[in-house]
Amino acid sequence: MQIGIDLGATKIESVLLDNDGNELHRSRKNSPQNYKETIHSIADAVTFIEKKYKKKLNVGVCHPGSTNSDTGLIQNAYNSPWLNNMKFSEDISQSLNRRVMCENDANCFALSESFDGSAKNYRIVFGIILGSGCGGGLVINKKILVGPNFLAGEWGHIPLGLINEKNNIQEHISGKGLERIYLKKYKKKLTAEEIFLKSKDRSSVEYNFTKDFLENLGLSLSILINIIDPDAIVFGGGVSNSIESLDEVKKLTEKYLKSFNNLNKLNLKTVFLKPKYGDASGVRGAAILSRQNII
């Protein structure tokens, strides 16, 4: 059995899986939004499960941001700033008196879906989190690839345009990016969810706005495929959930790949998938992480 913890900006979710991936326990509580209390809250969740099952267990935690390979400090946890510049992995391991496997939430999402989710039959799997930001995780042969700089999968930070422009993929296809562009274009403030709801009316400006979003998404995915060429891409996050047709996204991606590679024909073999476990993929991936090697 393994315990998985999903540390989010607003909630801490815990799950217990058996060795076959069956869920034995699940609970959720509010995130304290304070570093010291976050450590205590995770430790309490683990202790509760272990007392219930009378056994010390392996623990994996998924969290926002990444870990600096030189310092061990969390960086780029934009929605959980209290984690930044903290030795989270070291502190939670000390608190629980064991080695705790900690990893970026997008990596755990990708691991879960490649292990026993919608992409379980594929070798190279890229997991995309399109929410308020734009994250990603790369799994090869059911092992997370992080790289020496712990930056593998961070496709949202790939720059677009000229070198002196602050312009990257995340600025165009994330929830916050869409909200910013919409406000600038229409002088009206809407959430990404509201934009997609209004876009269901084909006569609305939001419909055309989301069409532009899909074009930008297809363009961004063509860059990703040119670099990694995965067997499967799994789409997670709130913005991904608003996409009605992944087939349309795939066609747009194929269009840009043909254009950039000067191809007359292309039968794109990469499959585009919805996640089997939805929002639960991250916490399940954290549990699986505790028994996985990282390459």
Image: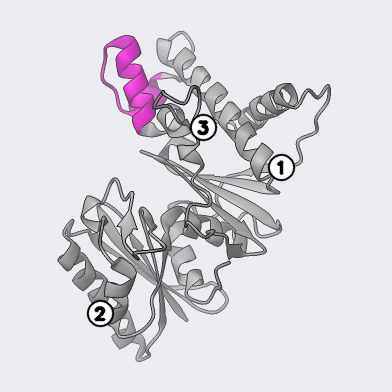
- Image disc number at residue 243: 3
226 left or right of 21? right
Q: How many marks on residues? A: 3
Q: Residues within 10 Å of mark 2 (few under 14, many from 20)?
A: some
Disc nearest the viewer among 2 and 1: 2
Out of 221 and 52, give the one closest to the viewer: 221
> Which residue of the protein is positioned furthest toward the right in this rendering?
264
Q: Earlier in the sequence, mark 2 or mark 1?
A: 2
Question: Secondary structure of the magenta portion, mostly?
Answer: helix
- Residue named by callout 2: 95
Q: Secondary structure at mark 3?
A: loop
185 left or right of 20? left
> Which residue of the protein is positioned furthest toward the bottom in this rendering?
54
Image coordinates for residue 21, horizontal then vertical, percent = 54, 72
Observer able to see residue 201: no
Image coordinates for residue 231, horizontal then vertical, percent = 71, 49
Residue 204 drawn above or below residue 210: above
Q: Quadrant of the C terminus?
A: bottom right
Disc nearest the viewer among 2 and 3: 2
Location of residue 144 by image quarter: bottom right
Observer able to see residue 92: yes
Q: Amino acid at mark 3?
A: Ile
- Residue named by callout 1: 270
Q: Residues within 10 Å of mark 3 (few under 14, many from 20)?
A: some
Residue 177 drawn above or below residue 50: above
| Residue at position x 48%, y 46% in the image | 154
Q: CA distance from mark 2 to mark 1?
A: 42 Å
Q: Amino acid at mark 2?
A: Ser
Q: Is residue 84 magenta?
A: no
Q: Which residues are magenta?
A: 176-198
Q: Residues within 10 Å of mark 1 (few under 14, many from 20)?
A: some
